[in-house]
Image (cartoon, helix red, strand yellow):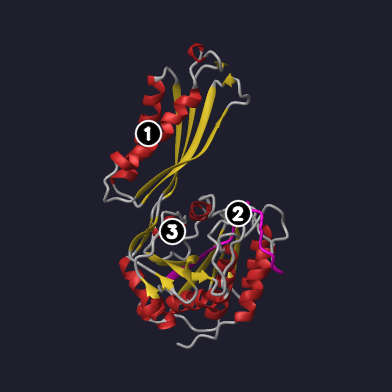
Amino acid sequence: MTLPPVDRAALVATRRDLHQHPELGFEERRTGTLVAERLGQLGYTVRTGVGRTGVVAVRDGAPAGGRCVLIRADMDALPVEEANDVPYRSRHPGKMHACGHDGHVAIGLEVARRLHAVFLPGAVKLAFQPAEEISNGAEAMIKDGVLDAPKVDAAFGIHLWNDLPAGTIGLMAGPIMASVDEFEITIVGKGGHAAAPHQAIDPVLVAAHVVTALQSLVARRRNPLEAGVVSVTQLNAGHAFNVIPGRAELRGTVRTFGGAFFDQAPQLVQETAQGIARAFGADAEVRYRRLSKPLVNDEKMMALMAGVAQEIVGREHVIDGIRTMGGEDMSFFLARVPGAFAFVGSAPQNRKASPHHSPTFDIDEESLVIGAELLSRTVVRYLEQGS
């Protein structure tokens, strides 16, 4: 089957327009409106308000009983002040597409355009998802029926990836992105004068011991053959240099690829914090939330996508073993249906790449073309193999 060529100029224009108008999770109204209008013009059946601000489109005309494949693109930006001096920089202070989701939306729309121009032996569903950065969007769309009517049989997605140079694609089977857990710990002590610590129960001291002990969970409570990260990222306490406060608050994250440490982490964090607090005569209140599961690529779907990737960039530019302790709520889709998620290299060739979530993040826009080719051809290959 011959697909129409990728419209690079339209891809870049769409991505740059979206980059100038970033919207945070569950605020993607302009983005969602643009997506819905473009898809409607192509002739897709469009639903808006799926998972609050998400958009779902289905390609009509699929034969009865045919398979349905879902393509997912996340839409939200980050609360980051852009530092790039480019014509398409963010027009909204304190908001920026600092992770490539503007490119994902542009790619999704180009995939929709290309696929609508050809006959396919099955249905195509496109999910433009809100709120990936806060790990709530995928579940919200699933609750609103994105995997039903028609029932989705497989799901594919990509992430533009500045850890890889443009012109490469990273793919591997199994877990490739980590679970995302969040913990909040409140240490409740007894305030007093800084010159008389014996009259107080110092929650700052307790918090310091808790931080140190939480690092030992990875060093001494985790199987060293299992990947795991525990990071305390916030510590707040007190308002004056000469006052021992009555409470201290910690916040952080646990990341794993599953396994025993994933199962044990909530209890370990709670027991560690509360045990240390009690030893000092303080109390610890622990709140532990699971935000997303590990993202796991199905072996057969990954092999299918890898075959397509080799045709696009060449076997030598398809890189195995690429995974990260970063999280992705695409994991909720892949926990319910088989599928694969690829990293499309986007590091600019002419300058040092900035990391994701940084104020100088930008991409080599040739990665948009590769992403559109990869997803379009993967859909065709999947549906043709099932016909």
Task: Classify mark 1: residues with Cα within 10 Å, few (<14), some (14-19) or many (20+).
Answer: some
Spatial separation of the CA atoms under disc 1 and disc 3: 35 Å
Q: Splitting the image into 4 quarters, where does residue 107 fall?
A: bottom right
Q: How far apart, in angstroms, are the residues tagged by discs 2 and 1? A: 31 Å
The label on residue 333 is 3
Q: Nearer the viewer, mark 1 or mark 3?
A: 1
Q: Earlier in the sequence, mark 2 or mark 1?
A: 2
On screen, 146 above or below 166? Answer: above
First reached walking from the N terminus: tag 1 or tag 3: 1
Q: Is residue 80 above or below residue 169?
A: above
> Considering only order in the chain, which callout, 3 or 2, is on the residue closer to the N terminus?
2
- Mark 2 lies on residue: 78
Question: Is 347 above or below relative to 136?
Answer: below
- Magenta stretch mostly in which secondary structure? loop
SS category of the residue bearing label 1: helix
At horizontal 49% and vertical 28% (from top left) the residue drawn is 186
Calculate the distance from the C-alpha at mark 2 to the C-alpha at mark 3.
Answer: 22 Å
Q: Give the quadrant of the N terminus.
A: bottom left
- Is 205 in front, or is 12? 205
Q: What stretch is highlighted in magenta?
A: 68-88
Residue identifier under label 1:
213
**Residue 234: horizontal and vertical position, in percent?**
52, 38
